[in-house]
Amino acid sequence: MIKIITDSASDIVGNTREDLAVLPVTITFGEEQFQDGVNLTHRMFYEKLVECDDLPVTSQVPPFAFEEVYRQVREQGDQAIVITLSSKLSGTWQSANIAAQEYGDTVHIVDSENASLGQHALVEYALRLKEEGLALEEIVERLERDKKRIRLVALLDTLEYLKKGGRISKAAAMAGSLLSIKPVIAIQGGEVAILGKARGSRQGNNLLTEQISQTGGIDFDKPFFLGYTGFGDEMLQKYIADHEALWKGSVDALETSSVGGTSGTHVGPGAIGVAFFSADEA
């Protein structure tokens, strides 16, 4: 059997598949440590986040956590494909490689060059390829090639958490708050990039849609995900309704999922995002 291994930055919750393992990122609030998705649900994370003056600290999955799963895979005579959070955003990819040094061809590691919903899309793609009967080497080749087509774009509700994380200045955050600035961000080259800023939620939603269209649109034959941060998906549902032309005629229904602590720490509540494979294969 081919086992897919990933980390909880992928925001895959409620996993019951035997061929998929999701290893938890550690999230620390003050002196309290939690295992993302194990003893810290997404809702619990946001409850703690809004109550804290300081940002929580996220820690990479350690090598020993990977090594434990690798050992089980080898003992069962199976092989594994590991899909990690972008190596430019976390040391988890490095941990996966350190643990794999003695496992040879048993373990193959893929840097998703993405995060959250984008990472989830690549994991789901790997599971589909496996179910189609592709060999491990073929799956890895397709993942390395097609991950370049994954787009993750998101609209943030606030600049406060980018300020707390030191990504923007206090003055920029204050000015943005006064002007009701809503930044649109993306993962580009494995890193977070700000694509644009809009005044108000309506302009922000339009800018988000523009960014989706500029990528060539969504390949609905491959996995895609819509997500939100915080306590509810009301903002995302409104976005879906207001921009139904993006989905109409392509899918019967759209499912939404919450984004957990690894990404939520940096973007805060109230954000919405879309991850998909671009229809433009160039």
Image (cartoon, rainbow, N blue to C red):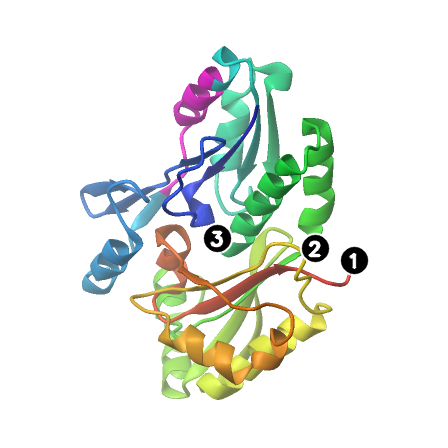
Q: Amino acid at mark 1?
A: Glu
Q: Is residue 68 covered in magenta?
A: yes
Q: What span is colored magenta in the figure?
A: 59-72
Instruction: Please name the residue that numbered disc 1 is placed on.
Output: 281
Label 3 residue SS = helix
Label 2 residue SS = helix
Looking at the picture, does residue 202 appear above or below residue 247? below
**Residue 14 screen position, x and y as percent:** 36, 45
The quadrant of the rendering that contains the N terminus is: top right
Dots 1 and 2: beta carbons under 8 Å? yes
Of the numbered discs in the image, which one, if any, rests on residue 123?
Answer: none
Mark positioned earlier in the residue sequence (3 or 1): 3
Q: Is residue 268 covered in magenta?
A: no
Of the numbered discs in the image, which one, if any, rests on residue 116?
Answer: 3
How crowded is the residue under tag 2: few (<14 C-alpha within 10 Å), some, or many (20+)?
some
Mark positioned earlier in the residue sequence (1 or 2): 2
Which residue occupies the foreground of this view, 10 or 60? 10
The chief SS type of the magenta part is helix
- Classify residue 228 as left or right of residue 148: left
**Residue 281 screen position, x and y as percent:** 78, 57
Whole-angstrom CA distance, mark 3 to mark 1, is 22 Å
Q: Amino acid at mark 3?
A: Ser
**Residue 40 screen position, x and y as percent:** 26, 47
Q: Quadrant of residue 24?
A: top left
Instruction: Give the mark count.
Output: 3
The quadrant of the rendering that contains the C terminus is: bottom right
Q: Residue at x 21, y 57 (%)?
A: 48
Mark positioned earlier in the residue sequence (2 or 3): 3
How crowded is the residue under tag 3: few (<14 C-alpha within 10 Å), some, or many (20+)?
many
Instruction: Please name the residue that numbered disc 2 is placed on.
Output: 149
